[in-house]
Image: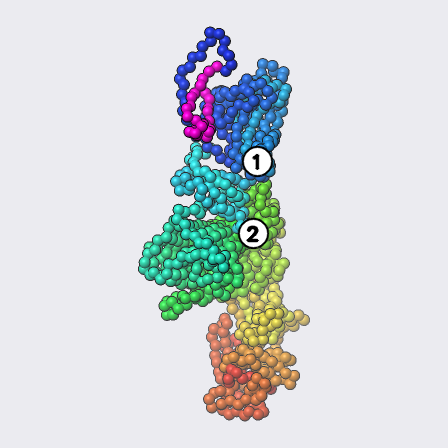
């Protein structure tokens, strides 16, 4: 059998007018020899499919003929079957160069690609003493017309006695190979035995690694939709958002793979970016391919005066009219800096059920992509966006609801120029592919494949944007701010290759919906920021999904509280991505592509120390998570760890109600790489306490995995009072596990005059005798590097001690000076920071404060030290002069004034005190002012007593008010105060001087309160 390949010249009717098949002897026949011919057929050969994964066709001779191989330099090719296998026989050879040859596709040979050559060779010879060495070469025809020979491999010498010998060689595509106009593979044997017959079997050149030129698709019928000449976008395999590329289809088809399955394939021309080994990729991390070309095109030439101004399409004020836009390609649309000028724009159309925006493409957009503004019930489905500027798929104002974004793809989302932002509140210079100004919409199955900032951004603010601010539901108060609106649906979305976070909720005020907002089944891989960044939020939960290869934190719970992280799989640095980063021909350095050290060490889940407490903040519930490939041993990334606490934000408090259940670490994750509190402890955050409801941390300390208890910082303040605290195996993580305990957090507030940083709160367990000494701090509001005199008011500036105590004991507490002396700080206000985590609810502490440790100083209750020590204010500040005069300036409210705390031990029921003081009012230059005493426009004096957490029960008594006022000199205050039973029962009491016009200053001196 033979194969004849018809050339273009042979079917050109100008050159060929008659075709004949001519059969005859080769050479001169011997006398009386006849040629008998029968069963002659000429039929079309099977169509040969070529692709870049296997450069050779019919290498195992199973076609029944040798096409597209051909003999080279003499000899013939036979197809031989031997047992169940087939092979080629090259016989009648006459020279060293006799052998087989086959053309390769030059388009597959890209510089730095690696291919693997393999074959089996057998020498057939009557003289077994002679040997020959198989040689495989490439013949390159260069574009200049010259020819180059490149030897790929040379086998060892073998004889007919050696039988089949296997040759295997991996080679890299050189620049000459890539630049050649044609490439041919040739076989030969060395000069030792040029006339031997040679058998070849299983000849193959398979793609080994590097950049591919063929895509294998799950859909075998892709050719019905995608045609030759169409442009497709291929999203990145790396964390570089600029790696998204557009290529042109040159062939579409289908074939059967090694498993007998029908698959589709696309060959293309152009740079696809860097995609090694994508055929074996995890489907969760595989890059996407989407077609940009459409049969209907809307494009615009740039404005000659502004290259960033193209056309725009707007659907304007069409309430209750269903719109349908499908299958259109938008090129170069949008006008950067012009409000409302976008490629596709629904503008204040209100409710439009049945409206569909489907299967469109938007590329090279100057400003945004598909914008839903003041419009509801639009289905945005299966659209593709590439190389666009600003936020891409967006809801614009914050009142849009019930819109559905399904299975859309965006790649290479670029920033707009800062000078071209539409307003001061817009953020398109930090673009997100999916940008939601309101949470009340549906996002399912979308892919954000590379933005200059974030993949998905819920920038839901504490105000209404744009024209939505005058919407009826806003004006009548029925629509809350976006940051307080309920969540729609967020499910099965994916973000990869973004320079920032995969998903973030980051308005400064935080997204705090009234009910749980679930971000479900989210995939975040290979982002240079966090996979998920939840900032300052409430009720945000992340359930299901896959988080891997992110440079930094997988899920960052940044000051957020009362949520869940459940059923999520984490992988720090997957083996697949490591192989991609380290593959030959990678477009960037390993330091750029690797998640190691780009921002900070890789971490899976990060919690924050956040000073909140109270009944709203109940910590985070962390359930059923798995962590794989963390730690330097398996990843090569220094300090990578599954869980940790942010070392950069010391808020002075870690809510002990965060709890974990069923946390699993793969076997390659060491104890030291499972959870690490050392960086946080080194930064001063040494009060971490996480409730373990079983199945998580106990095994890290060598205990029964089902043991319940607390994982705590290696800090005596946390480990002294409980029994049985055990270090983690190997002393890892600066953490201990304390089994069988519940921990409650207590906030103890005292007057700021105590100077808590120099006074310790000593707490002793009366049953065990063990004690701890806790330092305090001021809760100071700062203005730059200085305390804010105006904002540090009596109700914000206190001395605060935060204490973590195991329940079940009986405790007594007292305050001790650095010299070891006992003292009492006038009052102590203690409140629980929590209600107890799961399994510890309602378990209270039995703690008493020893107020007898120092004698009460009741002879004078008002103490005015240098610089006004002992006094606070309710706004306007406290300013003291050398002669003991105190001033309250910069007042902006009638309620601004001066406050002095009283020692509550002196306030027994029925005790009588004389109160005296001198008062003036002054203007902005210090001059004295008059006030209308008859109209209650002069200063007033109150005794305020409170009890309970943060003064939940308060008694007010106004004990002096002026009936007359003198402008010049001092106005004298004199009053007698008898302490009532209600006032005596309170835990905190103060004198409060306030009133008069808020524009006037208040001046006092010689304030006294003494017992009668």
Q: How many marks?
A: 2
Residue at the front extreme of this rendering: 14
**570 and 717: which is toward the camera:** 570
Indicate left or right for 255 with 851 as reference. Answer: left
Secondary structure of the residue carrying numbered label 1? loop
Indicate left or right for 458 with 192 as reference. Answer: left
Residue at 40 percent of width and 63 percent of height: 399
Instruction: Indicate whether residue 381 is drawn in magenta.
Output: no
Residue at the spot of label 2:
551
User: Relative to 699, does residue 435 appear above or below in the rendering?
Assistant: below
User: Relative to 36, does residue 864 appear above or below in the rendering?
Assistant: below
Residue at the spot of label 1:
143
Instruction: Tell me residue 164's x, y (percent).
Output: 56, 22
Query: Which quadrant is the N terminus positioned in?
Result: top left
Mark 1, other Cα within 10 Å: few <14 / some 14–19 / many ≥20: few
User: Relative to 30, does residue 11 appear above or below in the rendering?
Assistant: below
Secondary structure of the residue carrying numbered label 2? loop
Lower position in the chain sequence, tag 2 or tag 1: 1
Q: Which residues are magenta?
A: 1-25
**482 and 986: which is toward the camera:** 482
Residue at the top extreme of this rendering: 32
Instruction: Tell me residue 989's x, y (percent).
Output: 53, 78
Instruction: Tell me residue 355's x, y (percent).
Output: 35, 55
């Amino acid at each position: 059998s033979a194969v004849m390949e018809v050339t273009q010249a042979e079917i050109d009717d100008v050159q060929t007018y008659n075709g004949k098949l001519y059969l005859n002897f080769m050479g001169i026949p011997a006398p009386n020899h006849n040629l008998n011919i029968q069963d002659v057929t000429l039929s079309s050969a099977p169509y040969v499919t070529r692709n870049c994964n296997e450069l050779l066709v019919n290498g195992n001779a199973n076609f029944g003929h040798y096409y597209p191989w051909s003999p080279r330099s003499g000899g013939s090719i036979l197809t031989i079957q031997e047992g169940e296998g087939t092979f080629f026989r090259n016989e009648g050879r006459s020279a060293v160069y006799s052998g087989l040859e086959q053309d390769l596709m030059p388009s597959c040979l890209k510089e730095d690609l690696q291919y693997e050559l393999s074959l089996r060779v057998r020498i057939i010879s009557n003289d077994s003493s002679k040997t020959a060495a198989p040689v495989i070469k490439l013949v390159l025809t260069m574009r200049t017309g010259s020819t180059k020979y490149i030897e790929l491999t040379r086998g060892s010498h073998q004889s007919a006695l050696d039988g089949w010998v296997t040759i295997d060689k991996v080679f890299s595509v050189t620049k000459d190979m890539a630049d050649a106009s044609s490439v041919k593979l040739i076989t030969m044997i060395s000069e030792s035995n040029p006339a031997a017959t040679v058998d070849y079997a299983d000849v193959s050149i398979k793609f080994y690694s590097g950049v591919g030129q063929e895509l294998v698709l799950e859909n075998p019928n892709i050719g019905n939709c995608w045609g030759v000449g169409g442009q497709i976008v291929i999203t990145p395999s790396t964390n570089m958002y600029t790696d998204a590329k557009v290529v042109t289809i040159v062939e579409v088809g289908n074939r059967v793979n090694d498993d007998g399955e029908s698959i589709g394939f696309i060959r293309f021309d152009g740079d696809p970016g860097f995609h090694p080994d994508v055929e074996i990729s995890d489907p969760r991390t595989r890059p996407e391919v989407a077609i940009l070309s459409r049969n209907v095109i809307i494009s615009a030439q740039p404005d000659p005066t502004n290259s960033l101004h193209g056309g725009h399409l707007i659907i304007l004020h069409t309430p209750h009219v269903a719109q349908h836009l499908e299958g259109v390609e938008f090129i170069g649309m949008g006008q950067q800096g012009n409000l409302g000028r976008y490629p596709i724009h629904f503008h204040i159309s209100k409710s439009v059920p049945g409206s569909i925006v489907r299967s469109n493409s938007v590329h090279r957009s100057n400003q945004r992509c598909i914008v839903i503004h003041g419009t509801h019930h639009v289905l945005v489905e299966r659209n593709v966006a590439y190389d666009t500027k600003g936020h891409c798929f967006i809801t614009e104002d914050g009142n849009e609801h019930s819109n559905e974004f399904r299975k859309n793809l965006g790649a290479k989302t670029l920033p707009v120029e800062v000078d071209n932002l539409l307003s001061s509140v817009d953020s398109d210079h930090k673009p997100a592919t999916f940008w939601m100004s309101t949470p009340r919409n549906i996002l399912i199955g979308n892919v954000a494949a590379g933005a200059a900032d974030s993949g998905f951004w819920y920038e839901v603010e504490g105000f209404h944007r744009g024209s939505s601010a005058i919407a009826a539901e806003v004006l009548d108060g029925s629509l809350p701010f976006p940051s307080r609106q309920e969540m729609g649906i967020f499910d099965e979305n994916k973000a990869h290759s973004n320079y920032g976070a995969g998903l973030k909720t980051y308005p400064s005020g935080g997204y705090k919906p009234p009910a749980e907002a679930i971000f479900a089944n989210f995939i975040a891989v290979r982002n240079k920021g966090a996979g998920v960044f939840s900032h300052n939020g409430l009720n945000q939960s992340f359930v299901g999904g896959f988080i891997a290869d992110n440079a930094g934190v997988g899920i960052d719970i940044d000051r957020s509280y009362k949520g869940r992280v459940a059923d999520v799989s984490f992988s720090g640095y997957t083996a697949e991505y490591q192989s991609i980063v380290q593959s030959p021909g990678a477009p960037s350095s390993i330091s750029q592509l690797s998640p190691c050290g780009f921002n900070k060490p890789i971490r899976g889940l990060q919690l924050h120390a956040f000073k909140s407490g109270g009944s709203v903040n109940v910590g985070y519930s962390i359930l059923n998570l798995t962590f794989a490939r963390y730690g330097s041993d398996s990843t090569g990334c220094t300090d990578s760890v599954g869980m940790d606490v942010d070392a950069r934000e010391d808020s002075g408090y870690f809510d002990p109600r965060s709890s974990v259940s069923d946390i699993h670490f793969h076997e390659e994750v060491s104890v030291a790489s499972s959870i690490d509190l050392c960086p946080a402890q080194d930064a001063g955050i040494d009060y971490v306490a996480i409730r373990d409801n079983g199945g998580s941390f106990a095994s890290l300390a060598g205990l029964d995995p089902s043991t319940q208890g607390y994982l705590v910082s290696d800090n005596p303040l946390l480990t002294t009072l409980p029994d049985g605290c055990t270090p983690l195996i190997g002393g890892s993580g600066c953490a201990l596990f304390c089994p069988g305990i519940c921990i409650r957090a207590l906030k103890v507030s005292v007057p700021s005059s105590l100077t808590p940083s120099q006074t310790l709160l000593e707490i002793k367990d009366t049953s065990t005798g063990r004690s701890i000494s806790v330092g305090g701090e001021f809760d100071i509001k700062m203005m730059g590097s200085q305390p804010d005199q105006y904002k540090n008011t009596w109700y914000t500036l206190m001395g605060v001690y935060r204490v973590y105590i195991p329940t079940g004991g009986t405790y007594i507490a007292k305050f001790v000076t650095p010299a070891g002396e006992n003292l009492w700080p006038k009052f102590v206000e203690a409140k629980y920071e929590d209600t107890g985590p799961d399994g510890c609810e309602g378990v209270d502490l039995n703690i008493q404060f020893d107020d007898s440790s120092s004698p009460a100083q009741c002879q004078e209750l008002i103490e005015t030290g240098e610089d006004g020590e002992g006094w606070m204010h309710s706004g306007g500040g406290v300013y003291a002069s050398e002669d003991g005069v105190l001033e309250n300036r910069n007042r902006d409210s009638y309620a601004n004034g001066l406050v002095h705390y009283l020692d509550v031990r002196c306030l027994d029921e029925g005790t009588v005190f004389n109160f005296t003081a001198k008062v003036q009012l002054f203007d902005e230059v210090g001059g004295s002012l008059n006030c209308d005493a008859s109209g209650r426009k002069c200063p007033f004096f109150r005794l305020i007593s409170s009890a309970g957490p943060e003064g939940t029960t308060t008694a007010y008594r106004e004990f002096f008010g002026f009936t007359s006022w003198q402008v010049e000199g001092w106005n004298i205050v004199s009053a007698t105060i008898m302490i009532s039973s209600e006032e005596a029962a309170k835990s905190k009491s103060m004198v409060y001087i306030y009133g008069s016009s808020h524009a006037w200053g208040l001046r006092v001196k010689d304030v006294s309160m003494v017992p009668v």
